[in-house]
Amino acid sequence: MSFSDIFHPEFDPVEPHGAPNHVVFSCLQWKTPSLEVMPRAAKQRFAVMYGDSLNPYTSAALERAYILGAMSAVKLIAAHEDSLYLFLDSAVSSATFQEIESQWIQVMCMSHTRLAVDFANVDEVLSGRSDYCFWQVAKEILESYSLGIEQYDLASLDDFSHPPSIDEHIWACLSQRDSSHPEKTQNYTVAVRNIANMMGHSECLTSPYYVITGALPKGAQMIYYRLLYRASTSSR
């Protein structure tokens, strides 16, 4: 589903019978729900309820709001034909709400079509005190997903966060080498030794990572070369 270059769908849209459709989007976020700037970017997830389809005016309005810094407090948006109903994070204070409201009014004024905007707190929906016509659907969505702002786990972004599993994978690939052509193995051995001499890696030849990769699949070769580089740098 193509909706926006800024917001990315986390899951396939949910299209239940007899109820509004909805989809969960994610984006980078630098602000807290209280509009305070965070020291590093985080991930924001929010859901959008809609009818038959999401119109481009809704997409444009949400992108403008994001650029202006007005999306960080939003957890759920109910998109109607000529209006948006925004459900804000419970951490939003009355003072912050006035600033958010002002920003969204600015967003609505930029739209090429007339759009109204209403606000509510997610606590109103979760407690059953909301006057929104589809509040029960909104409550189910809020309870079904982890919406809001979540800090990234920086360690998980490292390709070598779990080296044992990488090692096991490379050795599993090595065990599947074709041994039916011993003359190829000898040629590969000479080639690896020559490359090692040219790169100054002669002392690393006895390392378990300095293995013959000529018969490996390309994906396994890339893993091997990474491990080879790690072995060479750690030996210096």
Image: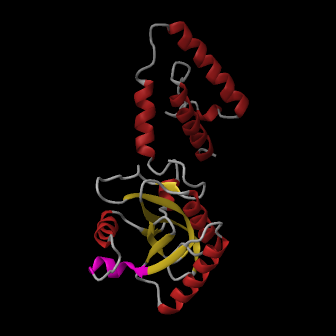
Q: Residue at x 54, y 49 (%)?
A: 2
When the figure is inspected, residue 136 is found, relative to residue 16, above or below; the finding is: below
Q: Where residue 28 sits in the image (x, y, percent)?
A: 56, 64
Q: Residue furthest right?
A: 198
Q: Residue at x 54, y 53 (%)?
A: 3
Q: Residue at x 54, y 58 (%)?
A: 7
When the figure is inspected, residue 53 is found, relative to residue 93, above or below; the finding is: above
For the residue pair 47 and 220, the one nearer the viewer reads as: 47
Report whether 46 appears left or right of 214. left
- How many discs appear? 0
Q: Residue furthest bottom?
A: 95
Colour setting: secondary structure
The image quadrant that residue 214 belongs to is top right
Q: Where residue 194 sits in the image (x, y, percent)?
A: 68, 22
Q: Where residue 51 sits in the image (x, y, percent)?
A: 41, 58
When the figure is inspected, residue 163 is found, relative to residue 210, above or below; the finding is: below
Q: Where residue 71 sits in the image (x, y, percent)?
A: 54, 72
For the residue pair 222 and 7, the one nearer the viewer reads as: 7
The image quadrant that residue 113 belongs to is bottom right
User: In this picture, which residue range is highlighted in magenta?
Assistant: 120-128
**Can residue 225 be found in the magenta stretch?**
no
For the residue pair 24 and 177, the one nearer the viewer reads as: 24
**Can residue 122 be found in the magenta stretch?**
yes
Q: Residue at x 46, y 64 (%)?
A: 45
For the residue pair 45 and 168, the one nearer the viewer reads as: 45
